[in-house]
Amino acid sequence: MDLLNGFVALANFVLIPAIAYGSQLALGALGVTLIYGILRFSNFAHGDTMAVGTMVAVLATWGLQAMGVSLGPLPTALLAIPVGILGATALVLLTDKYVYKFYRAQKAKPVILVIVSMGVMFIYNGLTRIIIGPDDYRFADGERFVISARTFRDMTGLEEGLALRTTQVITVITAIVVVAALFWFLNKTRTGKSMRAFSDNEDLALLSGINPERVVLVTWLIVASLATVAGVLYGLDKSFKAFTYFQLLLPIFAAAIVGGLGNPLGAIAGGFVIAFSEVGITYAWKKVLTYMLPPALEPEGLVQILSTEYKFAVSFVILVIVLLFRPTGLFRGKSL
Amino acid sequence: MRTVLLFAAVAGLILGTGFLQSWNSALLILNMGLISAVMALGVNLQWGLAGLFNVGVMGFVALGGLAVVLISMPPVSAAWQAGGGGILLGLVLGAATIVAAVLVWSRTSGKMRGWGTAAVLLVGLVIYRMVLDPSVEAVEAVDPALAGYLGGLGLPVLLAWPVGGLLAAGAAYVIGKTALGLRSDYLAIATLGIAEIIIAILKNEDWLARGVKNVIGLPRPVPYEVDLQNDPAFVERAAGFGMDATTASTVYVKVEYGLLFAAVLIVLLVLAQLALNSPWGRMMRAIRDNETAARAMGKDVTARHLQVFILGSAICGIAGAMMTTLDGQLTPGSYQPLRYTFLIWVMVIVGGSGNNLGAVLGGFLIWFLWVQVEPMGHLLMSLITAGMADGSWLKDHLLDSVQHMRLLTMGIILLLVLRLNPRGLLPER
């Protein structure tokens, strides 16, 4: 019984949050890795692209709520995601046309593009703050829990409750659907194949008649959609704040690099590696250990390896370890 | 010629502020401009001279700020008695753990290697926490409203400036050892991460510098305004200039700060210029322009990179210490990467990467714009919204959003300079 209680506590505080967070990171890291594979630079504006997409979705959600539209138990924001994607796509395509295209034509060095993306980051960040403001916004509505801790306790008679939030379930389901669609697209369609060819060998792809501008266009479309979906899911799960989204840049990059930059499968694995380590290392294990260990070994302290404020340190340390021992990442990305 | 004209133009902008707004705000811009110029000089050394992409400037600046607390604040003796020894012992044990882990890793091989290192780290971590945690709690319990930390050494505050540089240099050595030699994007991500970690440590380790409770009332290298106002000789002299004592004292203090900062800037600028034109500077540029060729010529690229990375970071640390001295307080919550890392980058790029004078110019110009965009934006928004009805939500929203205009403006300036004049206002010669 104690073992079961311990497992429920583990699932409640570590497994479920980490899976949800990992899915969000994976979607973010996929965007970074695609840009890296096809446009060949590290996009520092990715966190703020997520913020812009989410902002449009939040505004649309508020509009829908004002009109009285609702999805019943599901959050209204799901209906607003397409609007957010539209907004983010419009913005990144404009940016590409007026900013990145010039440097692509020049064949500028990747590091110049990184600095350019820094400028874009400033602009997106400013836009988000001007349009919606710098504060914390919650926009989740509908049913809060699929199973609340109390229902679970009543149902099973265990001491520990297992709360499953609607947003967590939606996050995981949406992530699976989006990732499946992405891989189907990359592996089965003509455009997807041309994207992969372009990523593998640009010159060869050009010789075989692939239109580079089309590949770039489709890449931005996909990246904007992924960023918006990731951003909305993260915002539903927690809340929307421009600065938090900027800070997500670090775990997202860590996920993409740990998995191997340029490798979509790696980005997903990296997202979960980062999420599980972050949650696992900053969680106070006392409760779980008290259930799992014999009473004699019961821990005295909280058994928390690092306090929650150090979660950035976790992604960073994992990043450094991977870079030192396997610079191409777990899944052998590109290392130029 | 171009250099002189551009510097004159920026001086004109600051003087204009003095005539149109007030001398206090002009001096405020000048002082922070001097500090920004020092930071830009540090980044320029790394990027302009060596092509290293450091986006962790904020962390080094914050370490400089920490140095001011550690050097200048009086020690809290009750806290030292409560747990000072324990904390020191804990830190030594922590360092010993890392050294032991590195030794195990380098001396063993095969399967035992990974597990052995992991075991050493785990055991070391447990001992470290067992020693450190009770002492930390004891220290933080000492008069938490006013102290709750170990305090500093009680030395003169000016000593904190070089120490700030040393702290930053130490951090840069550790980062450089791990991340240099990897590709440039990885250095960027690594420095971005380390900066966030340094801020997290400052925010959470209350025993070190009170965390988010902030250390206020740091000692100053210049007299206090109140003392000046109570000094009859000073009041008389101020009256001679036709100023009242309050204004005169604030201006006087700012001028003194300005002179101190200017002295540091000039020394660093001269050193940077000498370095740029020395054989060492030529070698650095050769490495930047063609690493492979430089390596073939027998240059130790990684060691040179480490060297210049440490030097540049140390300069950022000095600037950070200067800034915290000027503020008179350490507020870890106020460090934001957009302001302390990316803005410095805008300064270097706009001023002209690779040109020390350019970096200094960029520091002044961009800081001026950063401060003045807000009132300008306000003016613009008032014009736009003049026709709208008072109290309409759009008008209020637009007027509220003015304070975020600076991010947008900085982004546009950076993109325009990169596009139209990628070598900056004062290009490298």
Image (cartoon, rainbow, N blue to C red):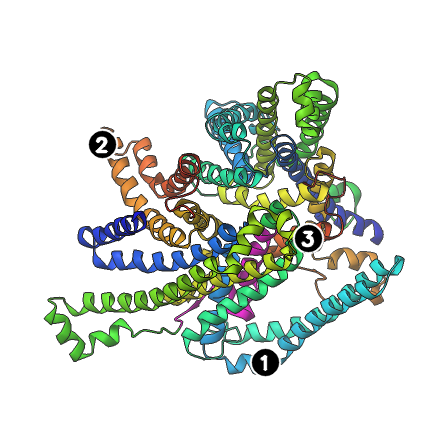
Q: Chain of mark 1?
A: B
Lower sequence index among marks 1 and 2: 1
Disc 3 target residue: A320
Q: Which mark is residue A256?
A: none
Image quadrant assignment for residue A266: top right
Residue B115, given in percent of the width and then of the height, sits at: 84, 59
Residue B194: say if magenta.
yes
Look at the image and tell me in which quarter the C terminus of chain A lies: top right
Image quadrant assignment for residue B38: bottom left
Marks 2 and 3: in contact by CB < 8 Å? no
Disc 1 target residue: B82
Q: CA distance from mark 3 to mark 2?
A: 54 Å
Which residues make up the magenta segment?
Answer: B190-218
Q: Are marks 3 and 1 on the same chain?
A: no
Residue A73, given in percent of the width and then of the height, sits at: 62, 28
User: What is the secondary structure assignment of the residue under circle 2?
Assistant: loop
User: What is the secondary structure assignment of the residue under circle 3?
Assistant: helix
Classed neighbour count for the residue bearing mark 1: other residues with Cα under 10 Å, few (<14), some (14–19), many (≥20): many
Identify which residue is drawn at 38% across, 42% down: B404
Q: CA distance from mark 3 to mark 1?
A: 36 Å
- Name the one closer to the observer, B389 or A269: A269
Disc 2 target residue: B386
Residue A303, given in percent of the width and then of the height, sits at: 72, 62
Q: Chain of mark 3?
A: A
Marks 1 and 3: in contact by CB < 8 Å? no
Identify which residue is drawn at 66% across, 51% down: B296
Identify which residue is drawn at 27% across, 59% down: B27
